[in-house]
Image (tube, rainbow, N blue to C red):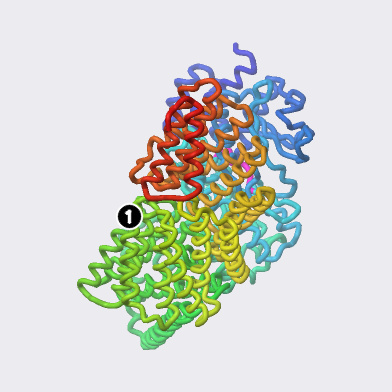
Amino acid sequence: MLPPSQRFEQVEDVFLSAVELAPEQRGPFLEQACGSDVWLRQEVESLLAHEHKSESIFAHAVSSAADTVNGESPRETPTHVGPWCLIRLLGTGGMGSVWLASRDDDEFQRKVAVKFLRRNLFGGWALRRFRHERQILAGLQHPNIASFYDGGTSGDGQPYIVMEYVEGPCITTYCRDNSLPAEERIRLFQRVCSAVGYAHQNLIIHRDLKPSNILVHHDGQPKLLDFGIAKLTDPSASDAGLTQTGLRLLTPDYASPEQVRGDAVTTATDVYSLGLILYEMLTGQQAQGHTNGSQLELEKSICETMPRTPSTVVLAGKAGGVAPSALKGDLDNIVLKAIRKEPERRYGSVSQFSEDLDCFLETRPVSARRDTLGYRVSKFLRRNSLLSATATVALLSLIGGITVALYQATEARRQAEQAEHRFAQVRKLANTFLFDFHDKIQDLPGSTPARQMVASTALSYLDSLAADSGGNVELRREVAQAYEKVGDVLGLPGSSNLGNWKDAKSSYSRALSIAESFPENQLILSRLTLRLGMVEAVTGNSAKALEQERRAAALAEEAERFNPSSAARRQIIAVNGQLGSQLVSAGRLEEGTTMLLRALAVEQQESTGSDVGSLLRVAVAHSKVASALKMSNDRNQTLTHLQRAQTLAERALALDPENSRTLNLLINVHRDRADAISSPFTPPGMDWPGALASYRAAHGIAVKLFKTDPANGNAAYQVLLAQASIADALRETDPERALPAMDLVKEDWKRYSHLNTNSQIAERMLLNIHLAGGRIRSGLGEQRRAEEEFNGARAIADLLYRKDPKRFTLLTDRLSIHTYRGVARMRSGQTAQAEKDFTACRELAGKMSVASARARELREAAYCFEYSGDLAYTHRLPVARAHYDAALGEWKAILAKGHKSPYLDSHIASISTKLRRAGGTP
């Protein structure tokens, strides 16, 4: 007979294999796995019979027994892991134990929770699950998710995770003990929604949401814990093999019907569990899991029985919930919608759930509605499929007879007329909000939240009207335009927006799907397709952006061909301007600049020059041309177009001093002027004092915009970009002041980056902050700190490259990072590591086409070869000579493109000297 320790390991192995099988497959499997071992089969069947009761069932039945036979005790846990000193045991479970610990060195003081995997689970599924949890936690950074600090394996081989220690009660206990009113409970719950929504955005479904996994810190901040059975929704992710087991380790009090049935788990599963948690937070009582019957009865209850309405539960229940009057109506409907048995009838996302709660708190219409009579009847018939045909027909006949009688009644006709009148009034009110009031405030500083409220409110009314309007094309057109305006507020690039690119894209896509059914719809389709292209560009999908913008151009030309109008001509100009800018960003300078000049010429022909809109359109066209010319280092023409743009913008500002579009344009003009006059490739050379003054002018306007509109993601981005530009200019003029300026940018980035979500622009700006910070620190002799900055830049560059490998500018960014990190490593004596970086930068330089590369790219390649030569000079002279010769070739290629400046002359002279010293001939 096996020793006790191996017997319980045998139980564990058979149970974990059986639990992954469908119920009907378990019997044959157990016959084969257990054979004549009656005790083994009884133990496994006992565990299987209780597998839904709680994850603690398995923990207690297997792990506790294993503790006993293995002799594992808290005393055998290591006293130290890495820099962490264990203080006391916080708790144990089926997977292992959790300890309170503190940092055991002089770096900083912090209490943490250290989670260990039980020794007897080091192999197979349990270890995979533990590593899976560690992988997920390492990728999540959110204020309402317990932070991951460290992880690894202890000296004696015990895997561990170091997490934030949260000292506080679970969320339902916190609500009860503090007697929170309904509004505070909802606000607290919305923070949890924010955390779960963030996990969903990172392709992670929690799958085990329950009050005990949400603790509330003493400062009132909830923290989401335990991603042990979370699922990666990315099909390429490495949680294969965990999925089915994870589904079975659920807690029935908070499990969804699809989890119980073993169906596919989606984000709707987490919505359901969140609904159950909110139910309990508001009522003080659980919504499901009350039955004391069999396992089958419990499953049937979860899958088929809707919980009682929250307000009635509070009325009949004990203390711990809120007043029934606070729940009755909209809040009842919101909670019940979240916990509908069918996933497709719940909220489409956690953010929609939270937004409906916002509507409730702000006394706006909510999307949740009671189940209709028709739906309840259909559900009844599906549940009772054995009803006789006679009874079914009789029931349907009765319903039909009542319906006919109601429609024939005079009272019904009168109510229908009143409803039609109200329909027209609500529609008129919604359109007044959307097209009159919204359009009047859209350019006012500070109006972004108000615009969102106006557009969203109008949309909610129009959407509900459209659902009852049949095929009313005009009403559907208004709904499409409402979605467009909501998208503009959420994230139209270049305008005042909330920086929510993902939801903006969703709103534009919804508008596009509605508009595709309209007759003569080319113009609106072009407008919406262009907006989708702009969002694709700002989120890093340059190929998709070009595809969308070309389609928008074709649609605009088609609209002009079939129905010539000023609106169609305006759209053609807008599309060409955006498409030209996108081509320039993709490195196709000549093609993009030609298109922008053509758009400018048409804009000037169309302009009256007498109103703000007309002046701004021409000014923006000049600004776009200037940006393109700046990238080709045509300083004189760049400054000419910038001056014209500024003159027109100042005329527009005189007509409307608070216009946010004009202020945004002036920010761009000042920044582009600074970039142009600090360019090293054109005479008379780099004017850093002048550039610094222009960057500060841009910063002053951006700060003014942001102070009046703190929800404006575009304004926050402009502030950060101007600060980063100032710090970079100080690197050339006053390095000692540059470092504090760059640190300030990083602090502000942490505070404001959430206003530009999913934006490649925001991520690339952070890349440049790290790159500039690294160059500053390297120049001041802080090579280790510089290397850390370059590592941060490299991580972002790799992420952006995976998103958009065709974007030309990312190749240059990666080349620069390797070059300057190599320099820092060379200066700190890390010769081998420096050589790796220089090899990488030379490989990237080899991918550049000299014919299409701009001066900046060629300069970075020249630096790469020059520093490679410096590293090789002392011990490999022929290699150094070849690198110096390649560097000189890059500088001469810049000259061949027509660039002349003291900067170029100086560098060519310097590299020629190095080449001669290495035995070469310039």
Q: Using the image, determine if residue 693 lies above or below residue 243.
A: below
Can residue 232 be seen in the rendering of this structure? Answer: no
Can residue 668 be seen in the rendering of this structure? Answer: yes
Residue 845: percent from left, percent from top: 42, 37
Give residue 846's quadrant in the image: top left
| Quarter of the rendering occupied by the N terminus | top right
| Depth order, front residue of 213/104 | 104
Q: Using the image, determine if residue 38 lies above or below residue 695.
A: above
| Depth order, front residue of 468/156 | 156
Amino acid identity at mark 1 = Glu
Give residue 771's quadrant in the image: top right
| Depth order, front residue of 363/71 | 363
Q: Is residue 442 magenta?
A: no
Residue 268: percent from left, percent from top: 48, 52
Secondary structure of the residue carrying numbered label 1: helix
Total numbered circles: 1
| Quarter of the rendering occupied by the C terminus | top left
Q: Using the image, determine if residue 507 lies above or below residue 16.
A: below
Q: Is residue 225 magenta?
A: yes
Give residue 825's quadrant in the image: top right
Q: Tell me what residue is drawn at x 73 percent, y 31 percent.
A: 83
On screen, residue 828 versus residue 794, left or right, reads right
| Depth order, front residue of 685/391 | 685
Residue indicated by mark 1: 590
Residue 443: percent from left, percent from top: 50, 75
Q: Which residues are magenta?
A: 224-229
Q: Tell me what residue is drawn at x 49 percent, y 43 percent.
A: 797
